[in-house]
Image (cartoon, rainbow, N blue to C red):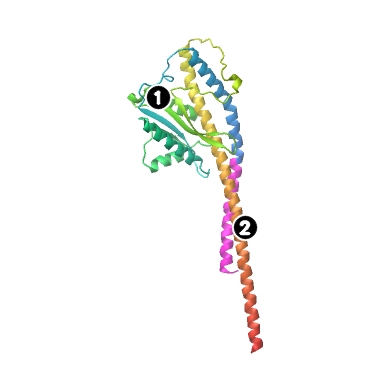
């Protein structure tokens, strides 16, 4: 075996090993994304129901609540940025960070100071590399978030919002995350969480304007005190689950693309090795024929 043929074979063997890894990661992501999609499907009805309940209470109770009251002159805006803990998911985290930078420019242009809250090591790395400060961060759960983590994030965000900018908090809160549409499409979206601007989920048109009539017991303010924190937690949990499903879908596509590229490279190097081998054989035959002709002449 010649040196060139040996080099091509070594490269081919290396890529075959890499292909096994990417293929395994593709299968793992494919199996986990099924469960992630199921969790999104299971939690969305509750998120929709509590959204409608909060909407009805806020609409018909005529109560001014700290979580629903617009600040007269907001000076600080909190932004929760939802990224992944690991890479190998294509442009998933980069798209979220790019959108968060656009939101930062917009808010600063409106005269608001941006206070970042981060989830995922990718966001932490982005801010640490640029030596930017952030209010808080949560990591280690991006592809399998729990309700307890959502509650912890919710409590911190609500606490800072209620405090307001005068007491070291913020005057409004936004979330930049990825909404899971299907296995092919995931869209980065910005949601204003607080002050509460109730946004109806995707419901049939026939039911969009229909609200049930509620009688508040004990009272409207107490109902809001109970419902609004649960609403914020449920909304954050649903967004985290959507982001997890989007991350796994993006990772599956990225690993499939890497596996397909590895197969193409293996074919290329196999063909080049065969060509090098044929060239060596042709050279050897030419040398033998040339040597035989020289002997015959002598």
Residue 2's disc is none
Q: Secondary structure at mark 1?
A: helix
Q: Is residue 156 visible?
A: no
Chief secondary structure of the magenta span? helix
Q: Is residue 275 visible?
A: yes
Name the residue tied to disc 1.
161
> Is residue 16 inside the magenta stretch?
yes
Residue count near mark 1 (Cα–Cα under 10 Å), binned few <14, some 14–19, many ≥20: many
Residue count near mark 2 (Cα–Cα under 10 Å), binned few <14, some 14–19, many ≥20: few
> Looking at this view, is 62 or 122 the one in front?
62
130 relative to 75, above or below: below
37 relative to 167, above or below: below
Please state the horizontal and vertical placement of residue 195, each as a whole percent of the image: 43, 23
Identify which residue is drawn at 57% across, 62% down.
8
In the image, which residues are magenta?
A: 1-29
> Looking at this view, is 49 or 233 the one in front?
49
Q: Secondary structure at mark 2?
A: helix
Identify which residue is drawn at 62% across, 61% down.
270
Name the residue tied to disc 2.
267
Please state the horizontal and vertical placement of residue 179, each as a whole percent of the image: 53, 33
Please state the horizontal and vertical placement of residue 83, each as a whole percent of the image: 48, 37
221 relative to 148, above or below: above
């Amino acid at each position: 075996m010649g040196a060139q043929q040996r080099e091509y074979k070594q490269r081919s063997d290396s890529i075959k090993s890499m292909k096994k890894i990417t293929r395994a990661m593709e299968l793992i992501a494919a199996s986990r994304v099924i469960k992630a999609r199921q969790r999104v499907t299971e939690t969305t009805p509750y998120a929709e129901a509590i959204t409608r309940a909060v909407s009805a209470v806020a609409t018909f109770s005529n109560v001014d609540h700290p979580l629903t009251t617009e600040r007269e002159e907001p000076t600080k805006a909190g932004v929760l940025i939802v990224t992944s803990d690991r890479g190998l998911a294509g442009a998933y985290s980069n798209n979220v960070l790019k959108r968060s930078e656009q939101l930062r420019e917009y808010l600063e242009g409106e005269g608001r100071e941006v206070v970042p809250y981060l989830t995922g090591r990718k966001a932490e790395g982005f801010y640490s590399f640029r030596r930017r400060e952030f209010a808080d961060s949560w990591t280690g759960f991006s592809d399998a978030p729990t309700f307890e983590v959502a509650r912890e994030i919710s409590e911190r965000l609500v606490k800072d919002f209620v405090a307001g900018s005068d007491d070291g908090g913020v005057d409004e809160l936004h979330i930049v995350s990825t909404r899971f549409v299907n296995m092919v499409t995931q869209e980065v979206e910005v949601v204003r969480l607080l002050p509460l601007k109730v946004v109806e989920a995707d419901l049939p048109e026939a039911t969009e304007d229909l609200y049930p009539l509620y009688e508040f017991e004990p009272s409207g303010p107490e109902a809001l005190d109970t419902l609004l924190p649960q609403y914020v937690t449920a909304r954050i949990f649903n967004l985290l689950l959507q982001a997890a499903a989007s991350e796994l879908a993006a990772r599956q596509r990225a690993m499939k693309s890497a596996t397909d590229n590895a197969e193409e490279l293996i074919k290329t190097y196999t063909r080049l090795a065969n060509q090098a081998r044929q060239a060596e054989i042709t050279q050897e035959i030419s040398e033998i024929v040339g040597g035989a002709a020289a002997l015959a002449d002598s």
